[in-house]
Image (cartoon, rainbow, N blue to C red):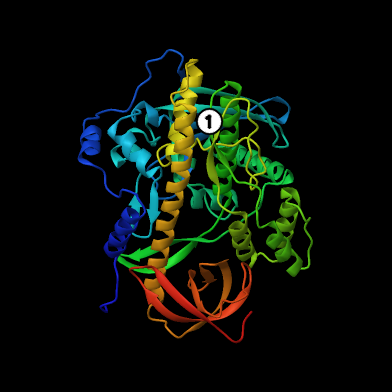
């Protein structure tokens, strides 16, 4: 092992420094640890209005190693091809009270931070992976979003209420997807729980219909390549892309629908809310130009349905390069943000999802906006006043947006630190690259093997997002997460 080799603990130290520089706290205070240490049991139902749904075939589907389980789902067939979908979201507020030390830490960071050096959870693991997690076999309080879907995936009646639930099976994306695709056996828990196989196939059928309906309305088919660090013991050996699969899409479709129901429920109850919006893209003209370069046309003004038709066509025509096109479009669409929505206002909506009503509500162990929404929901269900004023929510919306951006920058920093570690021995090698960023601050490019991004320090003039170039690796800095490329002849 050479002197430049870095381990997981080295990357974790870099992550801690990067978090502090961005106003994120990597460690829990003694007050938080004492508060959580005093907890002995999960919250129990004390309100007779809380329904008992423990008999349903609830299951969770998440990453293989996830223990902070925020949601469960179950499907019930109805007449005329309709299906009732229930999504149970962990009642985190039952133990993380507003104004508590744990709430203060969550309010500061606003999100869990997922880095190549490790996970920095928003809430202590005693909560997020145990007492407020919907773990297998555990009875837990939850908020349930109930939705009726037509045979074509269109939404019908919906309801929100509190309930007690029990997770029958903790399942993982990859194993479920392989089974649904006919590429593998049923996961052991699916085989062990009577009726769960048929239950999951019903959920999958409904999710496929929901996805088709969403995309017909202009929801965008985007497929970017995110990576996760792979270690051999403590030594980083690879960065592997996280790819979409059928099980991930199932959960994504259910969560999008549940978030829409939640937003509309709060609006009906005349409650303020934190909406998640993606504004109409300012750089639409560059998206039009990208389409023109591929021999296709888009309207001069932003049009989500037209963009989705273009994306679906490109995915079918060139699936290998579709993630590159997706990345370019994602950069040009801009970032989502949290905004205050007051009763009677017309919400701006989410351009990428092609929906008007959208909030974040399904991951309260991992995101503070979801915990805020949960408190608003519980107040609305009880018929009481909102627990936050409009001014408080407006300030929190700005803070959550800023901290999400800071967390994203830390995560990107660590991906770059890990990438710099992987390529530091390959100085002078040349690669085909895609321009992923272009502004006054500089030009950035991504290579595919290994999957890393860096700055183009020479030859970046007159390049824009989506352009293809040939580059040479000229410098790396693991600590700062710097990977420098120079443009060379033979590409672009």
Q: Quadrant of the N terminus?
A: bottom left
Looking at the rendered image, the quarter that the C terminus falls into is bottom right
Where is residue 292 shown, x and y percent of the image?
A: 76, 66
* Residue drawn at the location 67% of the way across and 43% of the way down: 354
Quarter-wise, where is residue 313 in the image?
Answer: bottom right
Quadrant housing residue 42: top left
Q: How many marks?
A: 1
- From the top left corner, tell me how far across and down residue 174 is, in percent: 50, 52
Where residue 6 appears, x then y in whole percent? 29, 70
> Is residue 294 at all visible to an observer of this figure?
no
Q: Residue at x 71, y 41 (%)?
A: 213
In the image, residue 403 sits, relative to residue 161, either above or below, namely: below
- Residue topped by disc 1: 273
Q: Is residue 306 left or right of residue 370?
A: right
The relative height of residue 228 versus residue 177 in the rendered view (above or below) is below
Q: Residue at (70%, 45%) from the top-left corner?
A: 212
Query: Can the viewer see residue 326 in this picture?
Result: yes
For the point 47% across and 84% down, which residue is it?
Answer: 429
Q: How dense is the environment of label 1, judged by Cα within 10 Å: few (below 14), some, or many (20 and up)?
A: many
| Camera-side residue of 98 and 402 | 402
Q: Nearer the viewer, residue 72 or 394?
A: 394
Q: Nearer the viewer, residue 427 or 462?
A: 462
Label 1 element class: strand
Decide if residue 410 is on the left or right side of residue 212. Answer: left
């Amino acid at each position: 092992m050479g002197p430049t080799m870095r381990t997981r603990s080295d990357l974790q130290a870099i992550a801690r420094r990067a978090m502090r520089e961005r106003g994120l706290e990597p460690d829990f205070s003694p007050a938080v640890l004492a508060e959580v240490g005093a907890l002995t049991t999960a919250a129990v139902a004390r309100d007779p209005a809380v329904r008992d749904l423990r008999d349903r075939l609830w299951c969770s589907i998440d990453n293989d190693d996830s223990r902070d389980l925020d949601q469960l789902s179950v499907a019930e067939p109805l007449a005329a091809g309709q299906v009732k979908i229930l999504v149970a979201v962990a009642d985190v507020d039952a133990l993380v009270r507003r104004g508590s030390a744990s709430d203060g830490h969550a309010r500061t960071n606003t999100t869990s931070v997922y880095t190549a050096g490790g996970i920095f959870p928003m809430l202590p693991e005693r909560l997020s992976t145990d007492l407020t997690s919907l773990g297998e076999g555990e009875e837990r309080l939850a908020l349930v979003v109930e939705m009726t879907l037509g045979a074509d995936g269109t939404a019908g009646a919906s309801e929100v209420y509190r309930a007690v639930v029990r997770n029958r099976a903790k399942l993982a994306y990859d194993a479920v997807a392989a089974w649904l695709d006919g590429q593998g056996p049923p996961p052991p828990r699916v085989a062990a729980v009577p009726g769960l196989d048929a239950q999951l196939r019903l959920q999958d059928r409904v999710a496929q219909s929901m996805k088709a309906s969403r995309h017909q309305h202009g929801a965008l088919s985007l497929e970017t390549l995110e990576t996760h660090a792979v270690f051999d013991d403590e030594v980083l050996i690879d960065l592997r892309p996280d790819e979409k699969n059928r099980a991930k899409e199932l959960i994504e479709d259910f969560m999008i629908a549940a978030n829409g129901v939640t937003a509309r429920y709060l609006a009906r109850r005349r409650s303020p809310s934190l909406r998640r919006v993606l504004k109409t893209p300012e750089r639409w003209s560059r998206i039009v130009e990208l389409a023109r370069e591929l021999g296709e046309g888009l309207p001069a003004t932003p049009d989500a349905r037209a963009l989705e038709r273009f994306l679906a066509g490109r995915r079918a025509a060139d699936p290998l390069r579709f993630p590159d096109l997706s990345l370019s479009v994602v950069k040009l669409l801009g970032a989502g943000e949290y905004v205050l929505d007051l009763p009677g206002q017309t919400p701006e909506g989410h351009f990428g999802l092609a929906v008007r009503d959208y909030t974040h509500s399904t991951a309260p162990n991992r995101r503070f906006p979801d915990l805020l929404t949960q408190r608003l929901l519980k107040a609305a269900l009880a018929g009481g006043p909102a627990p936050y004023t409009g001014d408080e929510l407006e300030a929190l919306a700005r803070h959550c947006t800023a901290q999400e951006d800071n967390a994203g920058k830390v995560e990107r920093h660590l991906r770059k630190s890990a990438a710099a570690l992987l390529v530091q021995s390959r100085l002078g090698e040349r690669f085909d690259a895609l321009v992923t960023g272009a502004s006054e601050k500089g030009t950035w490019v991504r290579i595919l093997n290994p999957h890393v991004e860096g700055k183009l320090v020479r030859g970046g003039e007159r390049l824009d997002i989506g352009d293809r170039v040939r580059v040479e690796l000229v410098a790396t800095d693991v600590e700062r997460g710097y990977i420098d490329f120079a443009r060379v002849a033979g590409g672009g």
